[in-house]
Image: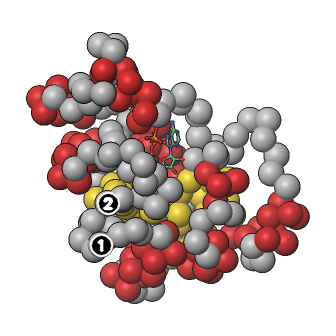
Amino acid sequence: MSEKRGVLRLGVLGGTFDPPHYGHLALAENGRVQLRLDRVLFVPARQPPHKPSRPITPAHHRVAMVEAAIADNPAFLLSRVDLDRTGPHYTVETLALLQQEYPGAELYFLMGGDSLAEFLTWRDPAGIVRQARLGVMRRPGYEPDLAALERMVPGIRERLVWLDVPRLDISASDLRRRVREGLPLRYLAPPTVEAYIRRQHLYEGC
Ligand code: ATP
């Protein structure tokens, strides 16, 4: 393990996790193996800057669900870095705080393939790639214009690593809809997460 060489390789998966599901876990686990990460931090957002309109489930529920989802993987950890401070939270700041918390660690920010186009609209994308490499899920049929990306965010090309992750067509919004409509969550999210949702009656209203 690279930790033995003294450099901690740390994956960072930010999200709302409302709720966490197998799409998140597949991305984190494939990132862990392909990037030889020692740890993957799941970083729930308090109030994500790009989702200001929808009421987000209270953080303590999302934390409990992430903890339930990652409990069986010793490399996965929950980070409260974005929960214990007031928002809005920008990835560039989150990474700076994590770098302080884990001095000398190499950061790998993990993203679903859809997020790369959006990434250009995030605050200070150049600052993000200065602090972290990007582990991005490759999407079949999607060939990003890397030269154009590089023009907009100098340095991004050499900081970007493509991940081979099976595309699971699962999203938290769809899971919330499924609960509302009485459809099953089984095989879409870990049973422990589903049990928590049922116990706490989450997502049953509109
Ligand atoms: P919502 O449906 O509420 O927008 P979501 O399912 O996309 O939520 P987020 O918490 O917003 O979940 O996502 C956190 C991170 O996980 C993002 O980088 C996102 O691209 C990635 N992600 C979400 N769903 C999947 C999936 N099915 N496979 C791989 N990555 C995913």
Q: Is mark 2 within 8 Å of ligand 1?
A: no
Q: Position of residue 106 (x, y in %)?
A: 51, 76
Which color scheme is applied?
Answer: secondary structure
- Within 10 Å of disc 1 (Cα), the crowding (few <14, some 14-19, many 20+) is few
- Tally of numbered discs: 2
Q: Is residue 186 left or right of residue 170?
A: left
In the picture of the structure, the residue carrying the numbered disc 2 is 46
Q: Is residue 183 left or right of residue 31?
A: left
Q: Is residue 12 left or right of residue 82?
A: right
Q: Is residue 142 above or below residue 184?
A: below
Dot 2 falls on a residue whose secondary structure is loop
Q: Position of residue 125 (x, y in %)?
A: 64, 72
Q: Position of residue 63 (x, y in %)?
A: 23, 52
Q: Upstream in the sequence, badge 1 or badge 2?
A: 2
The answer to whether the residues at label 1 and label 2 have Cβ atoms under 8 Å apart is yes
Q: Residue at x 35, y 29 (%)?
A: 176
In the picture of the structure, the residue carrying the numbered disc 1 is 86
